[in-house]
Each structure stands twice: as C-alpha cells, then as structure tokens.
Image (cartoon, rainbow, N blue to C red):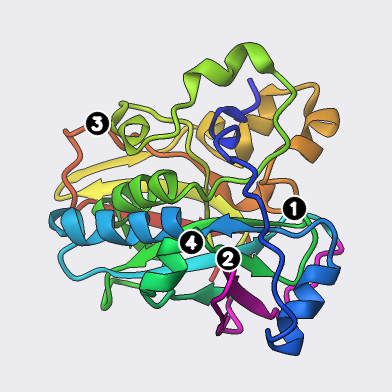
Amino acid sequence: MFVLLTLFCAHANAQVKPTIALPPVIIAAKANGDPVEKSFRKMVRGMDLFAAERSLSPNGVLRFKLLPRKPDTDMKSIEMEVIGSTVAFPVEVSPDGTFTLERNAKALDENATVIPNRKSQTMTWRSDIRTPGLPPNTRRLGDLRLECRVGMEAGLISNSSNIIGRLTQAVLDTPAYCDRKAPLYLFFADRPLFSVALVSGNRREVLSIDKLYASASDDPGLKSDLPYCDCEVLIDRTYVLPLGDRSWPDDTLVEFEYMDGD
C-alpha cells in the first residue's frame, strides 16, 4: 500500500497582507498568489519541543529543510520571509535548502507566516537534526526520532489531502504519532537509496523493500497517487523507520547504501 499516511497533516495558514512599508522582497511574496507557507508559531513550537526532548539527540543540531516536490521546482536562490501584520524579516536559506528561524516575540503575537517565494505544492518541508561526527553514510536513530516529533509539532508535512480519505484517521497531527512502533513518516536520504540497515552493537537488520521507495514496489496505482505525495520527485530517497520500537536504542546507527555506490 502506498505510504501516504504521513502526508495528511498540513493545514492551510492564512497569509496576512503586508503593508506598503514592507521591503520589496515581501511584496514579491505577496504577488505569488499560491505560496508555500507555514505557521511561524508552529515552527517555534517545534523548536521548543527540540529543546525539551534533547535526551533523544544530546548533541544534535536542529535546522529546517526545504525539499523539491515537483520535477521542475527551482531550489536555487530561494528567498524566504517571516510576515506578520506589522513585522517582517528575511530568513536565509543555505544552498542545501536548510535554514534556522530566529525567535521573535512580535511575529509570535501576530501569528506570522513563513513564506518562501515558491508556489504551493512545489516544495515540502522537514526538520533536519544531525549529530556531528557520525561515520560516513549514517544517521543516528535518536536524531530521526526527534526529527519526526519536531516535524509533526511544527506542522511541516505538505500534501493535497483529498485522496485515500479512509486512511487519514491513521495520521495524527501530533508528535505522539512518532511513538508508534512503525509510523509511516517519510524520511528522505541525501541521495537515491539501494538499501538501509539498522545497526546496534552486534545486531544488524536490513530494512525490507516495503520500507523503501514509499512502498512503490507494492503499489500498482503509484503513478496516479504520486501527485498527492510529497515524495513525488524524491521517491528513490524515501524510507520509513521503526521509530517506536525501543529494542533499537537511540544510539542505533541507520546505515545507507546509495545507488551510486559511494
């Protein structure tokens, strides 16, 4: 079954019209009639959750990440703003699509919106938590557990949600969803995947094929479903993990073997 269960958590956020006094780049964002946007308040709540649950990732560093959702999405030179009714400030996006948010009391009070200059459904969002100094081609399971929790708290998952409605009750817009033994939360590797393995001490387990590629191998309707999945152009990088299975400790390494062999 196509793994779309994690993709029904996004909520539309109303864009507050900026005033004439705002910088020109914000006026450009206003001119985009169908923007990608997220709630500043929710994203700050995700930052608060990261601070409160650092035990999952004691040395991890939190950033947010923008990812392409359509084949023609331009991910270069993205401009992004936080826009409230009277407050506005730019957000620097790194070449790898990651960024951080500064805390701003006025933006919180005004329920500001985080708006990149790209149209709706052209990008998706994730939290990105990484512990420095890990072996090459690995991630830490505790980091990824916290990524899921922060992503859910921050309301980052993007989708158009009218398909497979009977399954939407399986997805909760809450970090508690990540505590399930096998939550269908889509992670994206840095490059196309050949395999993913969990390694803890002498224990090693390679993920089954249905945990990769958004279960594409099991889905005859994949082509028609893809436009509704924020994995549309990242399907060869997609994987899910047994986040709630505590037999795998937080220090478990997630090892990636990439299609390019590096």
Question: Quick one: label 4, few (<14), some, or many (20+) residues within 10 Å?
Answer: many
Dot 4 falls on a residue whose secondary structure is: helix
Circles 2 and 4: CB atoms closer than 8 Å: yes
Dot 2 falls on a residue whose secondary structure is: strand
> Any mark on residue 245, and which?
3
Dot 3 falls on a residue whose secondary structure is: loop
Q: Which residue shows up at 76% across the image and 51% down it?
A: 121
- Amino acid type of the residue that numbered disc 1 sits on in the rendered structure: Val
Residue 105 colored in magenta in the image:
no
Is residue 178 toward the left or the right of residue 54 in the image? right
Quadrant housing residue 15: bottom right
Dot 1 falls on a residue whose secondary structure is: loop
Image coords of residue 39 (percent x, y) = 52, 55
Find the distance from the CA under tag 3 to the CA under tag 1.
Answer: 29 Å
Find the distance from the CA under tag 3 to the CA under tag 2.
Answer: 34 Å
Task: Give the mark nearest the N terminus, 2 or 4.
Answer: 4
Image coords of residue 111 (percent x, y) = 49, 58
Q: Report which residue position mark 2 lands on.
A: 114
- Amino acid type of the residue that numbered disc 3 sits on in the rendered structure: Asp
Task: Give the mark nearest the N terminus, 2 or 1.
Answer: 2
Q: Report which residue position mark 1 lands on.
A: 233
> Any mark on residue 40, and which?
4
Q: Relative to 133, say whether 187 is above or below.
A: above
Image coords of residue 175 (percent x, y) = 34, 38
Rendered-image quadrant of the N terminus: top right
Q: Which of the two marks, 2 or 1, is nearer to us in this view?
A: 2
Q: Residue furthest top?
A: 166
